[in-house]
């Protein structure tokens, strides 16, 4: 567990070890979720892979068309985020 300080603009600096575990680099896109008073940070590039793994393990109940639609949706969202970031650095 790491203790981080939030600066005036609401930013934190992720420790290098956390970034490596999540596969993050400078400029990576992440999703930030709040649930039950906790924050979850997820690498956007890994979300589609996680969906496929969960589907294969039977952790989520979707037919093949639905899972493909979900993966495509995530990939398109990541591409939009990257394109927007490149236009507005």
Image: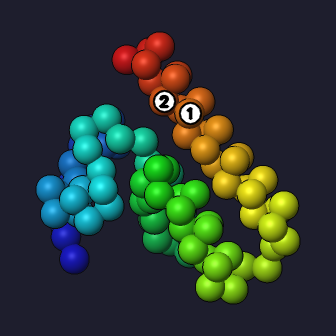
In the figure, residue 59 lies in which quadrant? bottom right
Q: Is residue 43 positioned above or below 18 on the image?
A: above
**The disc label shown at residue 79, or none:** 1
Which residue corresponds to mark 2? 82
Residue 5, position as x, y percentages in the image: 21, 55
Whether tag 2 and tag 1 are in contact, CB under 8 A, the answer is yes
Instruction: Report whether residue 62 is seen.
Output: yes
Asked if residue 37 lies left or right of residue 61, the reply is: left
Q: Name the quarter where the N terminus is drawn.
A: bottom left
**The disc label shown at residue 20, or none:** none
Q: Nearer the viewer, residue 22 or 6?
A: 22
Question: Which residue is found at the position 69% from the left and 47% from the top?
Answer: 72
Q: How crowded is mark 2: few (under 14 residues within 10 Å), some or many (20 or more)?
A: some
Q: How crowded is mark 1: few (under 14 residues within 10 Å), some or many (20 or more)?
A: some
Question: Which residue is found at the position 42% from the left and 54% from the top?
Answer: 43
Residue 75, position as x, y percentages in the image: 61, 44
Q: Name the quarter where the C terminus is drawn.
A: top left
Q: Is residue 26 positioned above or below 16 on the image?
A: above
SS category of the residue bearing label 1: helix
Q: Which of 16 and 69 is in front in this view?
A: 69
Residue 15, position as x, y percentages in the image: 17, 57
Question: Which residue is found at the position 81% from the left and 73% from the top?
Answer: 62
Q: Is residue 1 positioned above or below 68 on the image?
A: below
Instruction: Report whether residue 4 is seen.
Output: no
């Amino acid at each position: 567990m790491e203790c981080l300080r939030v600066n005036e603009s609401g930013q934190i600096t992720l420790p290098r070890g956390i970034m490596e575990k999540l596969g993050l680099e400078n400029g990576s896109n992440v999703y930030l979720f709040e649930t039950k008073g906790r924050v979850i940070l997820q690498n956007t590039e890994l979300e589609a892979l996680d969906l496929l793994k969960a589907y294969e393990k039977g952790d989520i109940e979707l037919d093949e068309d639905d899972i493909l639609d979900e993966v495509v949706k995530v990939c398109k969202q990541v591409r939009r985020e990257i394109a927007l970031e490149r236009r507005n650095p």
